[in-house]
């Protein structure tokens, strides 16, 4: 009997040990059928779950509609609202047929209130027709590498079978959109006022994104979505200590908490590590005199790393062998090599190395970059030269 008690105790201890939660992003649970979390600067995937499966995406479609409207250069133009727009089913900002409204206001209505009528009005003004705009949507998707995506409308309603994307593709799209300061501003706006043509008071649109408005202090924006077939979809962004994150969930019963959990995991586990400054490469040993003090990179290189990963970081610089006919600096190609970032023996990033031949534009330190540099110095982040 005593022997059986000892065996039972050993078995219990074993199960207790294997049931201890491990602080691994790969083992973090989410309610979503598909989910992904990436770091904005590098694009590194910090968490994923079935991220490449094609699924219906509902109103997070409108991220593509918004960025195309912004990039059209027509934000100050007034669009005329059509009969087709006002009869679009689902969520609306209650536009009126024949109304002339600024494209900028339509994008706010699209992103904050998920107006399907606004989506159609935008599509018709920017693309000439909904069908023409859908062509632009798919063109942009291909351009930025959304390999598992096809758009059939500008709003995400389930009116076409060939309208789908993946969590990974929507993260790519959001990362791209967040590079645009106008998109950043609109996505992160809590309340927007727009003129009301037949009333003395303005329309007031409040953002449906509860992470931004009440639930998460580090939220910087995003887009909600829901249809009966797609279920709940959500794209959100967050920023803390200089690190910007993009999260996507598709078909999630508890999406608010899914996103908070992913963000908190990343903010606690990863630091945004500065690997190289933009500009002239310092402390790079070169054999060929032609390269001396002539090599530079065009962007700062950041990468999110855990403390353990920082010890495994390696940087390799590979350069072209100079040609005999490089008698003049102008004979040297613009790109002469690359910097490869290696973490745990895995290549995680590559950065082109440029040659200062008098023709290639070297980066100027913008006010934003100067402030950012000061932040990282003040925060005590490491810097590899």
Image: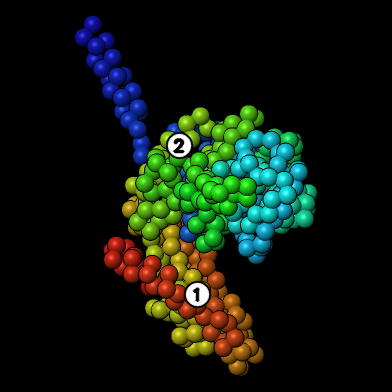
Q: Position of residue 307 (x, y in %)?
A: 33, 53
Image vertical order of residue 336 relative to residue 35, above or below = below
- Which residue is more in the foreground, 278 or 117? 117
Q: Which residue in the protein does label 2 denote?
A: 256
Mark 2 element type = helix
Residue at image point 60% right, 57% down: 104
- Which residue is more in the foreground, 202 or 104? 202
- Which residue is more in the foreground, 17 or 252? 252
- Which residue is more in the foreground, 101 or 46? 101
Residue 50: mark: none
Q: Position of residue 74 (x, y in %)?
A: 66, 63
Mark 1 element type = strand
Q: Is residue 323 left or right of residue 28?
A: right
Residue 1's quadrant in the figure? top left
Image vertical order of residue 365 relative to residue 16, above or below = below
* 1 or 2: mark nearer the eye: 2
Q: Residues within 10 Å of mark 2 (few under 14, many from 20)?
A: some
Q: Position of residue 98 (x, y in %)?
A: 73, 49
Q: Which residue in the protein does label 1 denote?
A: 297
Asked whether residue 173 appears in the rendered view, the answer is: no
Which comes sooner in the sequence, label 1 or label 2? 2
Q: Is residue 203 left or right of residue 220?
A: right
Q: CA distance from mark 1 to mark 2?
A: 39 Å
Residue at image point 65% right, 54% down: 101
Asked whether residue 78 appears in the rendered view, the answer is: yes
Q: Residues within 10 Å of mark 1 (few under 14, many from 20)?
A: many
Q: Is residue 1 left or right of residue 133?
A: left
Residue at image point 59% right, 31% down: 231
Quadrant in which the C terminus appears: bottom left
């Amino acid at each position: 009997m005593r022997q059986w008690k000892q065996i039972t105790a050993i078995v219990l201890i074993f199960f207790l040990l294997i049931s201890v939660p491990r602080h691994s992003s790969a083992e973090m649970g989410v309610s979503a059928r598909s989910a992904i979390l990436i770091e904005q600067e590098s694009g590194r995937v910090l968490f994923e779950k079935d991220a490449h499966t094609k699924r219906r995406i509902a109103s997070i479609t409108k991220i593509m509609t918004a960025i195309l409207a912004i990039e059209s250069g027509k934000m100050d133009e007034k669009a005329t609202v059509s009969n087709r727009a006002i009869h679009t089913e689902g969520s609306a900002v209650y536009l009126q047929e024949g109304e002339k409204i600024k494209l900028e206001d339509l994008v706010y209505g699209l992103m904050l209130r998920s107006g399907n009528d606004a989506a159609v009005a935008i599509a018709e003004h920017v693309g000439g027709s909904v069908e023409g705009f859908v062509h632009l949507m798919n063109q942009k998707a291909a351009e930025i590498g959304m390999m598992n995506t096809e758009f059939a409308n500008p709003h995400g309603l389930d009116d076409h079978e060939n309208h789908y994307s993946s969590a990974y593709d929507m993260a790519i799209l959001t990362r791209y959109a967040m590079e645009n300061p106008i998109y950043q501003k609109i996505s992160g706006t809590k309340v927007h006022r727009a003129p009301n043509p037949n009333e003395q008071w303005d329309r007031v649109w409040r953002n449906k994104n509860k992470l931004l408005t009440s639930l998460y202090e580090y939220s910087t924006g995003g887009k909600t979505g829901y249809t009966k077939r797609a279920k709940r979809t959500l794209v959100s962004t967050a920023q803390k200590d200089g690190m910007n994150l993009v999260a996507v969930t598709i078909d999630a019963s508890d999406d608010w908490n899914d996103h908070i959990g992913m963000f908190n995991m990343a903010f606690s586990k990863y630091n945004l590590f500065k690997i190289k400054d933009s500009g002239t490469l310092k402390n790079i040993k070169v054999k060929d005199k032609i390269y001396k003090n002539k090599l530079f990179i065009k962007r700062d290189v950041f990468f999110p790393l855990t403390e353990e990963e920082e010890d495994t970081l390696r940087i390799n610089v590979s350069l072209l062998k100079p040609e005999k006919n490089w008698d003049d600096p102008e004979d040297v190609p613009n790109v002469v090599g690359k910097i490869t970032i290696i973490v745990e023996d895995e290549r995680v990033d590559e950065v082109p190395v440029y040659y200062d031949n008098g023709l290639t534009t070297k980066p100027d330190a913008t006010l934003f970059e100067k402030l950012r540099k000061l932040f990282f110095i003040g925060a005590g982040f490491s810097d590899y030269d």
